[in-house]
Image: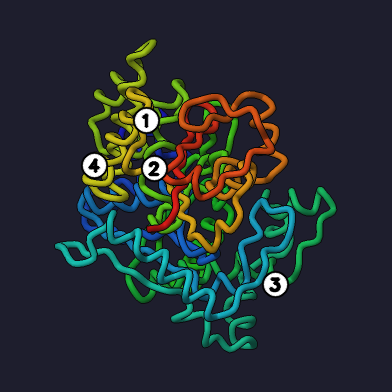
Amino acid sequence: MTYHPKSDFMRVMIERGYLADCTDYQALDEALSAGVVPGYIGFDATAKSLHVGSLIQIMMLRWLQKTGHQPITLMGGGTTKVGDPSFRADERPLLTADQIDDNISGIKQVFAKYLDYEGETPALMLNNAEWLDGLNYLEFLRDIGRHFSVNRMLSFESVKSRLDREQSLSFLEFNYMILQAYDFLELNRRYGCLLQMGGSDQWGNIVNGIDLTRRVLDHEIYGLTSPLLTTSDGKKMGKSQNGAVWLNADMCAPYEFWQFWRNTTDADVGRFLKLYTELPVEECERLGALQGSEINDAKIVLANEVTTLCHGAEAAAAAEATAREVFEKGGVGDDLPTLELSREELGDGLSIVQAIVRSGLAKTGKEAKRLIAENGARMDDEPLTNAGLVLDADALASPIKLSAGKKRHALIKLAD
């Protein structure tokens, strides 16, 4: 990237590694320098929480506000009814209106931690159901559909890759990119929105919205994408051994969230500090360049900074204290994920294999047995070798610590 930006926002995007592509660097930079630019990112409500994979987008909105502009969080109450087909091999399961509303109320919780909805340039929380739910199909086809070339839509990578693999693409999904383009048009018309941001897989959808707005309103608007992030070992960002790392505390405990960042591979530390924290770029680079055991201190800084933003400073401090207790002293930390069993639930006993699965250290019984067979499981810091062990009320008279490898731990205890 050789472009030298004038605006603070573009400078941050380039310096910290947020920028993959932009429809017009100079014109957007000039608009950002001239006044407040409202910019949006859309989030479909496919689950009750966003996960770490969405955090790069949330941080972009946060930086937009921190540099004096107006972030718009657009909930996909309308588009979730269709489902984004981008780079998917199959159609998304369709959700009911109640499920979508329930998911939106869960997702909204996280934004309040990153954005200010009341300050000088307050963020806006909008829902595209506001304009999509009441559309008249024939009018929409005539007024909006006529601006879309099917030939061009077929050329987009997200569609092409599906068709090249001879996988079905329903007419419902094909409409998604038209609806997303229409979102940008409506946000520009209603709220003066000038910028859409998203992951680089959204480039085609963003360009569609810019073209549509130009044709219908003759307004100049812009698109900016972030790189699709994978870890240095090629894994998709946001996934751990236990599945998605959710941003809502009721779906991923703050300790597990902290631990995810603490377990970052050495090669990713500097890059993740730039993307997911607000530490100065020079400090991110200094920490990322540490070698040997010192890089572990940088990982703790990363885990603390990211957890503080998402769950608060107290949760970050508690997670670090628990980690020190567990790793350095071999103790039982206060903040470990805990499986609490009632006496009725325990009955005559719980097999150690089921205990490992239910505490989240393995996904299946087969995986738990393999963990034991390969000497990867420990109970109260002692090697666990008996896959036939059964935990009864006597065994659980005091809490038991289970471990999978060196870094993943959980407690099992009887309810009082």
Quadrant of image for the N terminus: top left
Q: Nearer the viewer, residue 392 or 219?
A: 392
* Residue 372: % across, % down: 65, 30
Residues at marks 4 and 1, CA–CA distance in whole angstroms: 42 Å
Q: Amino acid at mark 1?
A: Val
Q: Is residue 208 above or below residue 410?
A: below
Q: Position of residue 91 (x, y in %)?
A: 71, 63
Sequence-first tag of 3 and 2? 3
Residue labelled with disc 1: 326
Indicate the secondary structure of the residue bearing disc 1.
helix
Q: Residues within 10 Å of mark 3 (few under 14, many from 20)?
A: few
**Residue under the image location 30 percent in, 22 percent down:** 297
Q: Which residue is mark 3?
A: 172
Find residue 336 and name its label.
2
Q: Amino acid at mark 3?
A: Leu
Q: Residue at x 26, y 44 (%)?
A: 308
Going from N to C along the chain, the mark reached first, 4 or 1, is 4
Between marks 1 and 2, how big is the CA–CA gap?
9 Å
